[in-house]
Image (cartoon, coloured by chain):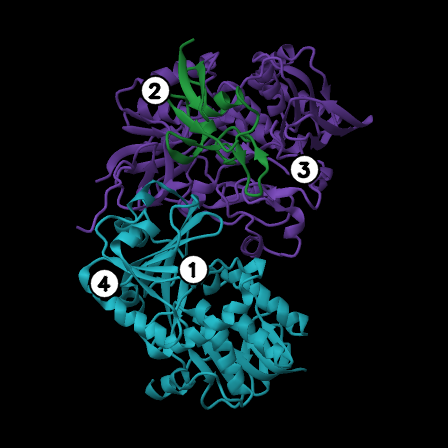
Chain colours: A green, B cyan, C purple
Amino acid sequence: MKQVRIDIDGQTLDVPAGISVAAAMARLRPSVRRSVSGQMRAPFCGMGICFECRVRIDGVAQQRACMTPVRDGMQVVTDG
Amino acid sequence: MKRYDLIIVGAGIIGTACADYASEQGLRVAIIEPGPIGGGATAAAMGHLVAMDDDPAELALAHYSLGLWEDFTDVAQIEYTRCGTLWVASNEAEYAHIPAKIARLAAVGVQAELIDSERLYQLEPALAPGLHGGMRVPREAVVYPPGMARHLLDRARARGASLYTQHVAALTKQGVLLDDRTALSGAVLVATGCALPQLLPQLPMRARKGHLVITDRYPGIVQHQLLELGYADSAHGDADSSVAFNVQPRPTGQILIGSSREYGSDTAQVSLPMVRRMLERTFRYLPSLRQLDALRIWTGFRPVSADGRPYLGRVPDRENVWVAAGHEGLGITTSLGSARLVIDQYLGRATAIDPHPYDPARAVASA
Amino acid sequence: MAERYDIVIVGAGPAGLAAAEAALARNARVAWLDAQATAGGQVWRKDVQHGWPQRAERVISKVLSHANLTWMPQTQVIAAEQNELLLQNERQALRIAYGALILATGARELLLPFPGWTLPGVTGAGGLQALAKQGWPLAGRRVVIAGSGPLLLAAAATAKRHGAQVLGIYEQADQTAVHAFARKLWRWPGKAIQAAMLRAQLAGIPYYYGSIVTRALGEHTLEYIEVDGPHGMQRIACDQLAIGYGLVPNVELAHMLGCAMTQEGAHPSVQVDASQRTSVANVYAAGELCGIGGRDCAWVEGRVAGITATGGTVGAALLQQQRHARKFATALGAHFKLDPYIHDLAQPDTLICRCEDVPLQALKDYDDARSAKLATRCGMGACQGRVCGTALAELGLFPRSGQRPPLFPARLATLGEFASSSDTEGSFS
């Protein structure tokens, strides 16, 4: 399967092309976002409804990771 | 029949401020509100506590009220955030007017400073290039108005004020009749904002629709409440519709975007063309906002009196009926001062500022 | 200027796909949008490892290669104004106009609060299935599937296929109810075959009836769950809990367009006639949006909508299929009713609103959704009440109110004069 290289919080990862950013992050750590009171959260609904999976992608904040396929060279910044 | 010293109709920011002060002064108070507390114009307000210097009477009331707001800075529910106001000058002429504004504010004790363009961009790097500078009012703050309305109501009720959740069907000789035929007797203070004509049709009132947009959390982009110096023209003007640059950083890190004004619409429906105009005005001053996500858009109606100043006082030709309504876009700022002005008149006491500019008789006489 | 299409279809699941195929067969110029990057919706989501299900792949390839089809992936509807839709994709905003609009926005999972539901490791059941198909690492992970409905079986099958160790399926409905449902399946041969296939795939995975997950526990991530069942309380160590209580129609766009709703139970669905017409002129709806009825029902209804929206007449055979498919929906609802116990799982400190971290106890003083929202921020976050509001409606607390634009979070540029998001210039000189 074709691989792409992405960066998550400064760590480089080679992942299969076509997977979501959420799936890529799950290979690295179990949680990606801090809730408003500081609890660690992870993707929950898997389909773009709950907004728990929001991360900064290529400089743009509040992107839903479960709705975004990985791209070669993508830079992802999480809360954790 | 239940007897009260004062029956307040409406639990928005004005009604609850009146209930708080009246109960504090030992009056037996009833407050009547069928909807959510602070659910009308109060919920659509930006919550910017601001002194505007173009109308002397308005400035006096605002200044009086802003002093009273200082007692609430620690109440969590109110989310009082002293971010300061930064008025932005887009051209030489606007910039040249600033010293006179600073002087007018200083005359009532509001401290403001002239900001040159270099300092402007140090304070707010997200502003578009080419602006001339501005006026900073560092001690001004933003609050969460429904939280304040709730807090004031809770204080009043802790002192024994009674909350009724029915509608008022009519004003009666003794007081009010509720829609379930309950009768309450006592002096009545109508604080129903845009709905004023339902009970007091003799006092002209128009509803001036506004839109608000709130973004997701993007902390650190904007520091102050930012407005264009032309904002007063929009607020005090009488155009059918107008927009003005007016943006607020919320304590959550969200950005609250206003402001629009529109007569002639009686539906709460969001008007996307109006939103477009408002946002395009916003982007002229803060172009990087284009990238941010809006979570929600909503509307509200500002209550506008015949001359734009609130009605604060006794209703002429009515024995025991008082009014506190018609604050346009300054209801939150002037709520506390308005309450004292009306209740002090009701109690026959000297008022802290001249009540004459707000006398309801002025509107009835010229109607 | 808005590009105009004969037919615009929102949603690329079975209903949308069937509608697209049918409309294209009648020579319509079709725009087909979905928020996901690939077609298939949820039930036919393209699996990164295994691709599309064969049947879906055939039709999807055929539709996507049709000359009259404009495919718009990763595109969300933001607002609607006078027969035009305001759309946004990753890079830009655009407007399109339609002769007829077919809504096939499907359903989302009913996600109900219980202690520990916010822990990393807890997802929806359909949620885990979606995550698995998009490449979520499941190999060797211990997974528990729980909640209610046939979706649990499909989720378990997908998890197993992706290498998970599925410890068990915990269905809240009791054995009598589930068996009665299974006995009815002969009437829908497609469903019966599906069930048999699933049974085969799931051989070796225990299936428990009358079992409810009451807590999820762990320090920073999920470590174990507590399940209440016919044999008492059990504690089960696991890495993922995939828990969902059925499906709820995604009515928000239809609501914004002014479509009349019907309501059986706590959640509205879009009201349609036999031609799949909604109460709004030129707006059609099909599939789960019109009531949870499963994939086959969605397919048939999508087909009907594709025909009627292009001015065609539906043959008697297809109408009969449509009626029959809808009866499955009724059976589904009847047999998987939720045990009221599930409504009481949330404790006072259990978060109800995940976006704004509002606990159940904060909501108790309020009688209506708006007062609660103004006072507690419940529903003010990014999901705009899609999770908490739906849960609260299910719990009988506050009914959901309507949806104003933006339908989903929208770039401010989209709501302005549709400048592209790369336009960041602005100057007073």
Q: Identify the residue shown where x is 61% and y is 35%.
A: C118
Distance CA(mark 3)–CA(mark 4): 58 Å
Distance CA(mark 2)–CA(mark 3): 42 Å
> Residue at label 2?
C63
Which label was assigned to residue C114? 3
Mark 3, mark 1: which one is toward the viewer? 1
Distance CA(mark 2)–CA(mark 1): 49 Å
Query: Which chain does tag 2 point to?
Result: C
Counting from the top left corner in percent of width and height, residue C360 is at 66, 47
Indicate the amino acid at tag 1.
Met
Which label was assigned to residue C151? none
Which label was assigned to residue B46? 1
Q: Are marks 2 and 1 in contact (CB under 8 Å)?
A: no
List the single residue furthest toward the top.
A1
Of residue C328 and residue C295, the one placed in the foreground of this image is: C295
Query: Which chain does tag 3 point to?
Result: C
Q: Are marks 2 and 3 on the same chain?
A: yes
Which label was assigned to residue B95? 4
Of residue C18 and residue B176, the one placed in the foreground of this image is: B176
Q: Is residue A48 above or below residue B94?
A: above
Mark 2, mark 4: which one is toward the viewer? 4
